[in-house]
Amino acid sequence: YLQSMPKSETIQLREKHVGAACQLFFRSSPLKIVRGIAQFMYDETGERYLDCINNVAHVGHCHPHVVEAGRNQMSLISTNNRYLHDELVILAQRLVNTLPESLSVCFFVNSGSEANDLALRMARIHTKKKDVITLDHAYHGHLTTMIDISPYKFNLPGGPEKPDWVHVAPVPDVYRGKYTHPADSESVEEVGRMYADEVGNICNEIKNKNGGVCAFIAESLQSCGGQIIPPDGYFKRVYEYVHEAGGVCIADEVQVGFGRVGTHMWAFETQDVVPDIVTMGKPMGNGHPVAAVITTPEIAKSFSDTGVEYFNTYGGNPVSCAIANAVLDVIEEENLLERASRVGNHLLSRCEDLKHKHRLVGDVRGRGLFVGVELVTDRETRTPATAEAKHVVNRMREENILISRDGPDSNVLKFKPPMVFTTQDADRLVETLDRVLGELDDTRISNIKLEVLVTPINTEVPKKENVIKSSVQKAIKT
Ligand code: PMP
């Protein structure tokens, strides 16, 4: 069925020839996904899964308009951006039209990591400074420079050391961060000010020591850090501190851009700020590798004044640009921002109901189709329910619903589905989650230590019924 070898053989070949550092979902019983349509993915047996995590397949897996645009352009020409091409300039114009006026110069690249790396390079050239402020638990890409500014990676036991020029500010997490609401203050805004002042203090330290800041980089809503919604006013105050210290502000929209928040095309707009550089990727190509950096004419001029040509073999090739233009067409024609707001609000309010039913649900937060459900074993102490979250993700998979978990303690259930998600999909997701959380209430599983270690790949493909039974039994037993 669309694939040439039995799953066990695929697993064996992968173990033999693909680096073990490459993560595999559900390692003890991985999924072999062979095709996708809209918000659904299918395995090699034809089993259908509801995809609640793939924010890359933004307008839906294999959207016909996007597929056709790629196929057509591939059959005409795929070359580099040293030649004129309409798809490239039209894409640049359309993206710029969605952004504040000052952000008018585009550079096309192939991945979010490349986009952030280029943004950092430009910031260094423009400010002639080196020190970068990043948020705790942030992830900005897999390149060496990006690992340097990604506590999500360098904080791991085997991770590299944080360089001296990198400064880590606390995540504005009002539920389980350094300052929480309501414990530390009267209002959420006040907690936001306390978090922003932490960045202000770092700016002062850098100014005193090294004369000024190069850049502040953050996701507009921190996804890798656990679906964090910063308090109103946080970024405004942070940007003021950073600008005052001579730095530039980079908004990483790689995960949360292109209308996911529903109310706006870009998540930074929800905080009423204007970054100096915006990076975008993932959803931009709906599964095809295309990304971009968009900045001000002043920063772009500093970059070109170096006299060093910027060339990127695939960045801005006509096929990638045609695909990205087709993604923008679908976002507009299918009114996907409005849908993200409507379905996202429905999903959020139904998740809120779970909080009243299940003691494990500590916090529910989100904006549009970006939602997090934080599980805790104790609501008073807000102790992370890591093992329970892992169990829930695995049980949901057994129910053919794919979700993931994130946050420093991996206890936040993460929903960021393709934007074609429907209210019926949201209902199915929440009703199944309700049942799975109910099982945990019944078995008092949260008092029991669940297995949290990575299990080796099982080359035997277990029968679905056995997987369900064994997973529940294992959870109850251990
Ligand atoms: N920034 C953020 C916020 C991301 O989530 C990611 C990828 N997870 C990246 C940058 C890097 O993007 P890519 O994997 O396309 O290089």
Image (tube, helix red, strand yellow):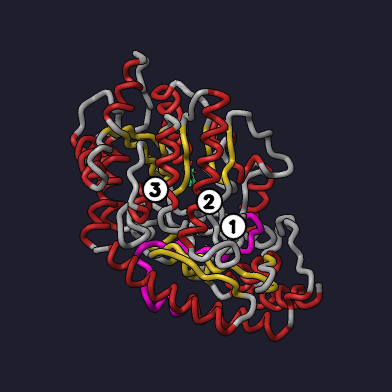
Label 2 secondary element:
helix
Asked if 77 appears above or below 257 in the picture, the reply is above
Asked if 181 appears above or below 310 in the picture, the reply is below
What residue is pinned by disc 2? Answer: 195
Asked if 30 appears above or below 97 in the picture, the reply is below
Residue drawn where x is 48% and y is 27% of the image = 212
**Residue extending furthest toward the front:** 186
* Residue 300, quarter of the rendered image: top left
Q: Which range is magenta?
A: 406-427
Q: Any atom of ligand 1 within 8 Å of the CB at mark 3?
A: no
**Residue extending furthest toward the right:** 478
Residue drawn where x is 36% and y is 41% of the image = 275
C-alpha distance separating marks 1 and 2 = 7 Å
From the top left corner, tell me how far across and down residue 350 is, in percent: 46, 79
Q: Nearer the viewer, residue 381 or 97?
A: 381
The answer to whether residue 418 is magenta is: yes
The three-letter code of the residue at mark 2 reads Tyr
From the top left corner, tell me how far across and down residue 43 is, in percent: 52, 64
Position of 24 with respect to 67 (left or right) is: right
Asked if 13 appears above or below 440 in the picture, the reply is above
From the top left corner, tell me how far across and down residue 32 is, in percent: 56, 59
What residue is pinned by disc 3? Answer: 236
From the top left corner, tell me how far across and down residue 287 is, in percent: 40, 50
Q: Nearer the viewer, residue 276 or 387?
A: 276
Labelled pair 3, 1 in contact (Cβ < 8 Å): no
Disc with the residue nearer the chain's start (1 vs 2): 1
What residue is pinned by disc 1? Answer: 179
Q: Is residue 293 visible?
A: yes
The three-letter code of the residue at mark 3 reads Lys
Disc with the residue nearer the chain's start (2 vs 3): 2
C-alpha distance separating marks 3 and 1 = 18 Å
Labelled pair 1, 2 in contact (Cβ < 8 Å): yes
